[in-house]
Image (cartoon, grey):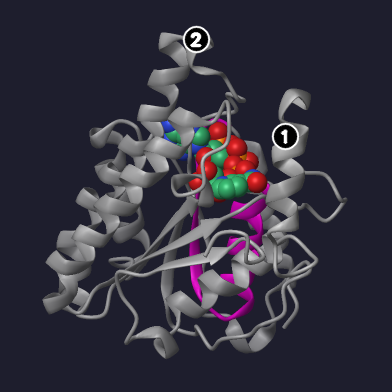
Amino acid sequence: MVIGSALPVDDLSGRVALVCGGTGRIGRAITRQLAAGGASVAVHCHRRRERAESLLTGLKKDQPGHLQSQRHIVVAGDLASVTAAHAVVREVRDKMGAPPAIVVNAAHPETGPAATDQISDSHLNAHIDGFRIHVNVCRATIAGMRDSGAGRLILISGALAVRPFPGLGVYGAVKAAANAFSRTLALEEGSYGTTVNIVSLGRVEYEDGTQAFDPDPRYEALDKITRMRMALTKMATPADVARTVSFLVSPASSAITGQVLYLAGGEAM
Ligand SMILES: NC(=O)c1ccc[n+]([C@@H]2O[C@H](COP(=O)([O-])OP(=O)(O)OC[C@H]3O[C@@H](n4cnc5c(N)ncnc54)[C@H](OP(=O)(O)O)[C@@H]3O)[C@@H](O)[C@H]2O)c1
């Protein structure tokens, strides 16, 4: 089965997955990949519901006959609020059963880089909300996940947690916090059969060759050095991220927990 550009790489049939933040370019690729593997997907959105609905229409259109039991839904909510996070997870559980696989891709809205002397309270709060999203989704889901005995939590993070870049101090700090939180959770939940892993992205290149943002020209030399440190010649694409997530959702990854997998072309090791 091919859904959009996604080819199945793992057998996920019978699995239910909630993709938090399914409307961005990376979230859409993850959603398509999991659906192509046979999973039923709850596509979460915050503000862009129409995007989530159109993604859902595409998934249903591409669904082959032999996977008619596959069922996808859209759920919406501001995950920076723990009440909303519980409501989203409850809705998925009521409509699809307790989701044993959760992908936390949602992040703060576009804020762009800001050097420390330019950091506003709204910039800081938006990023801290990004961290809240990670924590809220985890605390809303782990009780139900324990029941499944084989839960999967995958958190999308950033290489800026370990490799700083000017203007991205708060972003890197909240990603480092999310990493520390997730690895602690891996220790706490391992005995219940739940794995918790982090997919940490360097700069992602979209299919049209663009990237999320261009760095400040003052740091062009540093940007060049970062690229020179890459072992691979190509940056990761949303499809690369999606295939890695699919593996971590699949039974093939059952022995992996508490790990940070870098998709950064080797520039962060
Ligand atoms: N793009 C990159 O180069 C890059 C590099 C390193 C790491 N990452 C990480 O990869 C992940 C995805 O990045 P992206 O560039 O694809 O992001 P994006 O396009 O900006 O999408 C962000 C997603 O988060 C959702 N969201 C925003 N605020 C929310 C809130 N308060 N509650 C719930 N959901 C909320 C959005 O939902 P709506 O659209 O419905 O509002 C959207 O689905 C993020 O964790 C990001 O930090 C990206």
* Residue positioned most to the right: 208
Residue at 31%, 75% (x, y): give it: 257
Instruction: Label 2, secondary structure: give it.
Output: helix
Is the residue indicated by label 1 positioned so its CB lies within 8 Å of ligand 1? yes
Q: Quarter-wise, where is residue 176 in the image?
A: top left
Res 186 seen here: yes
Q: Position of residue 159 (x, y in %)?
A: 52, 52
Residue at 31%, 43% (x, y): give it: 177
Front residue of 115/92: it is 115
- Which of the marked residues, 1 or 2, is nearer the chain's N terminus? 2
Q: Position of residue 214 (x, y in %)?
A: 76, 33
Instruction: Label 1, secondary structure: give it.
Output: loop
Q: Amino acid at mark 1?
A: Phe
Front residue of 229/124: it is 229
Residue at 13%, 65% (x, y): give it: 188
Q: On the rendered structure, is 56 left or right of 91?
A: right
Q: Residues within 10 Å of mark 1 (few under 14, many from 20)?
A: few
Q: Amino acid at mark 2?
A: Asp
Q: On the rendered structure, is 157 left or right of 113?
A: left
Q: Which residue is mark 1?
A: 213
- How far apart, in angstroms, are the residues tagged by discs 1 and 2? 20 Å
| Magenta span | 25-47
Is the residue indicated by label 2 positioned so its CB lies within 8 Å of ligand 1? no
Q: Is residue 66 above or below residue 141?
A: below
Q: Which residue is mark 2?
A: 117
**Mark toward the viewer: 1 or 2:** 2
- In which quadrant of this rendering is ligand 1 seen? top right
